[in-house]
Image (cartoon, helix red, strand yellow):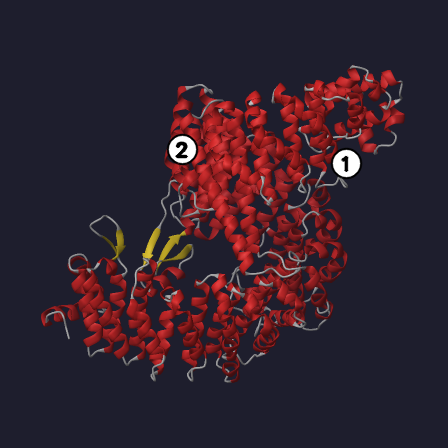
């Protein structure tokens, strides 16, 4: 029965017709009428009218469209009287909402046309989501959906699962048994569409519940897997594709539940990948399913007897599926598109899967089965086999680095001959492999194999095919950017002769790549490039002076990049007058840019940054023309669109530079290209402030107020927040250099800045970015200096730190719970996501530590009242089972000892036991922190600590005597213990009862050749003992002199400390009557030469 009058329905029916009109003006007027007359003024009537149209219209198109409009209107935001913003449907009076949703469910049950039923189902799902998100109840919906799931009508059964799929939150804990029954029934349904809908619903529901609850549903997996074989037998690729997507979802969430049937699933998936009668998408989804297990459960995968061999075989087979109907590569050669979209092609899927397998399973698992194929493939007569083998080497080299790096000679024996292959695509793949290996084995490839690699690539630059020429030049970029200047120098003539020839190529993309390669070579060769300056720079000027046609834009951009990188390489003196000519040319190009899509504008920004580094203060006259466009980009607001329907989503997806973010049933489109430009612009502002320092001051206020500080809270794009955090300290430093530390200008800027910095410490949602914010804070405090924070600032800092630490504890607890719910098998590593999360937390704690350190350093005891508020956290961390937490607590206590002097004694109850325990800690970093703490207590803690040092000395000696005390992991703890003993002996000698014995043992804790902070204290005390003619030192003068020589050669001693120890060393040799030549004979020749130079 209709609630609304017939005339209302007539008006609404006409409006729905107009909204579907093909006439744009009619449709626009209807949209306006809908928004102004209905949605704003009478939303209750609109939703009621729409639901009655869905129920009562005889026209299926009208019913379907009314359901679409209903869903859109119901989800619109609306302010309610108390000021809160809610979705429009939830703002309706309770009785009206109840009536409308009841009519909607009735319409769902009575609708007989599948497409219309699906649209009504989407509307039901939207309302269900709104209730679920707002923690409100819709008691009737589950009963209706369960009823539909048992209907005799296929479409009704399907829609029930479709709604479950989009809104799994409506299923509550008390319904678990009913849900289990419903899913089991769905998986066994007679109709495949229902079975698939049930699979999708199960995957969605499974993802929405916690790990503990998930285990109750593991028993359903055999039923789920039974759905697939009949579909494959019927060769129904589309249905198989859908089923595999659901399995991929499940494998991501709980791969271990597949363990009992994993081998069967491997066999089935491999059979799908092999089956060329199926569509590529179905085959690739089966490949993706198997790769997902490697991503999320590598231990299960490694234990399967056939997985690795079968997967590698299938990946390599897919990788040969390339260049169909283009056997001689004529079509490929003729194409100027260097970056075609091939993401849906089999050979790309195979390559990407090989890369993932290598990264997740490692060389020990992947290398042997891969290389059982590659030599045969490289010797094959089929060019596709040879191409696939080379691309496989490119794909696995990163993941198999540790094992492959020792076998590079053999790998190069396979790859290098390919550069002479008769087929151009094989030569291209050979270049690709060498380029990738140059990056993945950076350092080793350049140092050990340059004589094999570079002479092999250079002739390929003469290939008859432009695409091969360009790729050879691109491979050289990878090789040269990781090469030392000395390695490149012998090849420069040959390389640049060939690259200069490529600049004459008729293909613009070859010229562009040649310029990029020359720029990279210049960057690596530095001053050695000066020899080629006179040949190349005029060519680049010539390109930049050409008419600015659209076709030449990218070439000119590359020429700019090349010219400015050469300028950076050869330096200001070599540039001479060209420096001014170049910047004037850049300025002219900037003025000529009118098209927002012109690639020159982005390249130009980086070019200005390089020229600023080259010219330094001489760059200042150009700032007025450089800054306005840069400030415009850096000030850009986020371009965000709310996308209401699938049509809008599809339209945005077709445009490049957009990111789509699902949010509460809608999709938000964010134009990332604008944000990338904003990020780049702020990066360049950092460069200008760094290089120009005080001279950048005229721009500081504008950049700080309009760009950097707002950028700290730019939540649309993490990189913008990070680079804004890098910018703030540089801007403060610029003002400090311009006006002075105590100036009103700097203090006024700081007062406004510090409030914002403290605000973002409690507002930043991303853990990794929060670490950057703490870094920004402590670097800024370091710039402003002593007593720059008020007591209130310090209290606010502690509030933020407390909040961050509580959040950290919650994350640690959640990870522990996740491990408990997902027991890690023997030999199984933590998931990559968890390892990244742990690493992010460790970085955050480290940067928070530095912030505490910086405040103590600049404020001393005045920080203590605020600092004391977190005592319970310090205690908890110091007693934690987690080594990172203990280290954090120890470092905080070290700061109290170092910067609070005698006041530190008040906290002895918090400090003494952790220092003792820290010296015996299994973690070297914690022994280092404890040893350092004992040293600063002796140096700065005051006389009250004296009684502690007698026992502490023995603890420090224990640290130096541990097995492998000089190993890479332990040496810093050992050297800090050595320095700490020296501090006790120097500053608190009276507290050491058996000084002579302690000094004798201490000498054997030398040398200090790694820690530049510890070395000055250790060697200053050694110099003191030499000055005193201490018999323990003089008696073993040869050994002591070697310790001095080792520290000098390692450069852990610098400046006055180095001079003092050199003088002391001379005295030591003289008093002991030793010949330095004899003493040094046992040391390496380089060390002997360094020491002789210092001792004259």
Which of the two discs, 1 and 2, labels the residue nearer the N terminus? 2
> Where does label 1 land, which residue?
961
Give percent across and percent down for residue 953. 72, 28
Give percent across and percent down for residue 553. 47, 49
- In depth, the one of 618 and 669 nearer the eye is 669
> Where does label 2 land, which residue?
704
Q: In this view, does 1011 lie to the left or right of 1040?
A: left
Q: In this view, does 206 lie to the left or right of 1063?
A: left
Q: Do the residues labelled 1 and 2 touch (CB within 8 Å)?
A: no
- Above or below, 651 against 310 in this view is above
Residue 180 seen by the camera = yes
Give percent across and percent down for residue 608. 49, 37
- Disc 2 crowd, CA 10 A, few/some/many (<14, 14-19, 20+): many
Secondary structure of residue under mark 1: helix
- In depth, the one of 119 and 608 nearer the eye is 119
Q: In which quarter of the image is the N terminus?
A: bottom left
Q: Is residue 832 left or right of residue 689?
A: right
């Amino acid at each position: 029965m209709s609630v609304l009058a017939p005339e209302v329905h007539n008006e609404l029916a006409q409006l729905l017709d107009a909204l579907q009109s093909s006439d744009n003006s009619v449709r626009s007027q209807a949209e306006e009428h809908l928004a102004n007359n209905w949605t704003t003024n009478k939303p209750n009537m609109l939703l009621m009218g729409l639901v009655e149209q869905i129920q009562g219209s005889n026209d299926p198109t009208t019913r379907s469209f009314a359901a679409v409009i209903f869903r859109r209107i119901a989800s619109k935001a609306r302010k309610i009287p108390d000021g809160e913003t809610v979705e429009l449907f939830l703002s309706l009076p309770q009785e009206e909402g109840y009536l409308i949703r009841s009519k909607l469910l009735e319409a769902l049950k009575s609708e007989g046309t599948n497409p219309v039923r699906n649209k009504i189902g989407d509307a039901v799902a939207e309302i269900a989501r709104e209730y679920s998100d707002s923690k409100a109840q819709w008691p009737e919906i589950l009963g209706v959906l369960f009823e539909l799931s048992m209907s005799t009508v296929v479409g009704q059964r399907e829609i029930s699962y479709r709604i479950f799929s989009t809104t799994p939150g409506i299923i509550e804990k008390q319904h678990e048994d009913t849900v289990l029954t419903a899913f089991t029934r769905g998986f066994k349904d007679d109709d495949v569409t229902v079975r698939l809908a049930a699979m999708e619903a199960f995957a969605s529901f499974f993802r929405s519940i916690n790990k503990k609850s998930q285990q109750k549903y593991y028993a359903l997996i055999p039923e789920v897997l039974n759905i697939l074989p009949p579909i494959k037998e019927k060769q129904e690729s589309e249905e198989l594709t859908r089923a595999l997507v659901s399995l991929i979802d499940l494998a991501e969430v709980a791969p271990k539940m597949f363990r009992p049937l994993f081998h069967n699933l491997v066999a089935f998936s491999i059979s799908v990948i092999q089956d060329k009668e199926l569509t590529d998408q179905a085959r690739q989804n089966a490949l993706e399913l198997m790769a997902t297990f490697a991503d999320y459960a590598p231990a299960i995968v490694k234990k399967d007897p056939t997985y690795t061999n079968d997967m590698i075989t299938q990946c390599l087979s897919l990788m040969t599926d390339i260049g169909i109907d283009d056997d001689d590569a004529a079509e490929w050669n003729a194409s100027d598109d260097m970056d075609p979209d091939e993401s849906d092609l089999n050979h790309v899927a195979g390559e990407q899967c090989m890369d993932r397998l290598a990264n997740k399973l490692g060389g020990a698992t992947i290398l042997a089965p891969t290389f059982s194929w590659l030599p045969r493939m490289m010797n094959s007569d089929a060019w596709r086999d040879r191409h696939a083998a080379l691309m496989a080497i490119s794909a696995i080299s990163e993941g198999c680095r540790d094992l492959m790096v020792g076998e590079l000679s053999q790998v190069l024996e396979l790859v290098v001959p390919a550069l002479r292959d008769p087929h151009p695509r094989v030569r291209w793949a050979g270049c690709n492999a060498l380029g990738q290996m140059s990056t993945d084995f950076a350092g080793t490839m350049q140092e050990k194999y340059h004589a094999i690699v570079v002479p092999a690539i250079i002739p390929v630059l003469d290939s008859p095919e432009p695409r091969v020429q360009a790729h050879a030049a691109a491979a050289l970029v990878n090789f040269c950017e990781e090469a030392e200047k000395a390695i490149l120098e012998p090849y420069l003539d040959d390389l640049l002769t060939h690259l200069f020839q490529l600049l004459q190529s008729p293909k613009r993309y070859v010229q562009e790549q040649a310029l990029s390669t020359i720029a990279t070579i210049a960057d690596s060769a530095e001053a050695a490039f000066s020899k080629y300056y006179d040949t190349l720079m005029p060519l680049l000027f010539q390109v930049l002076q050409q008419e600015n046609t659209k076709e030449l834009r990218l070439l000119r951009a590359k020429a700019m990049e090349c010219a400015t990188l050469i300028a950076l390489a050869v330096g200001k003196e070599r540039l001479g007058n060209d420096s001014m000519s170049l910047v004037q040319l850049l300025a002219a190009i900037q003025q000529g840019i009118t098209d927002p899509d012109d690639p020159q504008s982005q390249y130009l920004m980086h070019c200005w940054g390089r020229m600023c580094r080259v010219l330094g203060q001489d760059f200042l006259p150009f700032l007025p023309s450089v800054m306005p466009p840069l400030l415009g980009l850096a000030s850009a607001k986020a371009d965000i669109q709310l996308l209401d329907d699938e049509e809008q989503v599809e339209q945005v997806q077709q445009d490049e530079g957009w990111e789509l973010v699902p949010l509460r049933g809608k999709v938000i489109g964010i134009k990332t290209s604008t944000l990338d430009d904003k990020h780049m612009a702020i990066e360049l502002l950092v460069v200008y402030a760094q290089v120009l320092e005080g001279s950048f001051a005229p721009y500081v206020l504008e950049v700080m107020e309009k760009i950097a500080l707002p950028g700290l809270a730019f939540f649309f794009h993490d990189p913008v927040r990070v680079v804004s955090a890098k910018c703030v300290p540089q801007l403060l430093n610029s003002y400090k250099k311009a006006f002075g530390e105590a100036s009103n200008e700097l203090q006024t800027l700081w007062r406004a800045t510090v409030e914002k910095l403290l605000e973002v410490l409690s507002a930043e949602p991303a853990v990794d970015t929060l670490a950057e914010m703490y870094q920004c804070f402590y670097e800024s405090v370091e710039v402003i200096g002593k007593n720059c924070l008020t007591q209130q600032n310090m209290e606010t800092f502690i509030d933020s730190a407390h909040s961050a630490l509580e959040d950290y504890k919650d994350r640690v607890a959640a990870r522990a719970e996740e491990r408990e719910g997902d027991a890690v098998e023997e030999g199984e590593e933590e998931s990559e996501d968890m390892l990244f999360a742990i690493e992010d937390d460790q970085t955050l704690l480290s940067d928070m530590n530095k912030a505490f350190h910086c405040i103590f350093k600049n404020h001393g005891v005045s920080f203590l009242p605020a600092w004391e508020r977190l005592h319970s956290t310090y205690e908890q961390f110091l007693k934690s089972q987690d080594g990172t937490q203990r280290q954090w607590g120890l470092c905080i206590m070290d700061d109290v000892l170092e910067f609070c002097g005698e006041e530190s004694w008040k906290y002895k109850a918090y400090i003494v036991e952790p220092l003792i325990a820290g010296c015996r800690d299994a973690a070297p970093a914690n022994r280092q922190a404890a040893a350092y703490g004992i040293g600063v207590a002796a140096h700065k803690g005051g006389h009250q600590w004296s009684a502690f040092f007698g026992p502490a000395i023995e603890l420090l000696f224990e640290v130096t005597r541990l097995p492998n005390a000089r190993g890479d992991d332990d040496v810093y703890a050992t050297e800090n213990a050595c320095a700490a003993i020296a501090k006790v002996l120097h500053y608190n000698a009276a507290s050491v009862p058996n000084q002579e014995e302690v000094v004798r043992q201490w000498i054997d804790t030398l040398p200090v050749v790694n820690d530049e902070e510890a070395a000055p204290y250790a060697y200053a005390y050694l110099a003191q003992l030499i000055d005193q003619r201490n018999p323990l030192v003089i008696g073993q003068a040869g050994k002591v002199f070697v310790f001095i020589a080792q520290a000098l050669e390692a450069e852990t001693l610098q400046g006055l400390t180095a001079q003092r120890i050199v003088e002391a060393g001379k005295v030591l040799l003289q008093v002991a009557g030793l010949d330095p030549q004899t003493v040094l004979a046992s040391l390496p020749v380089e060390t002997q030469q360094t020491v002789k130079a210092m001792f004259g």
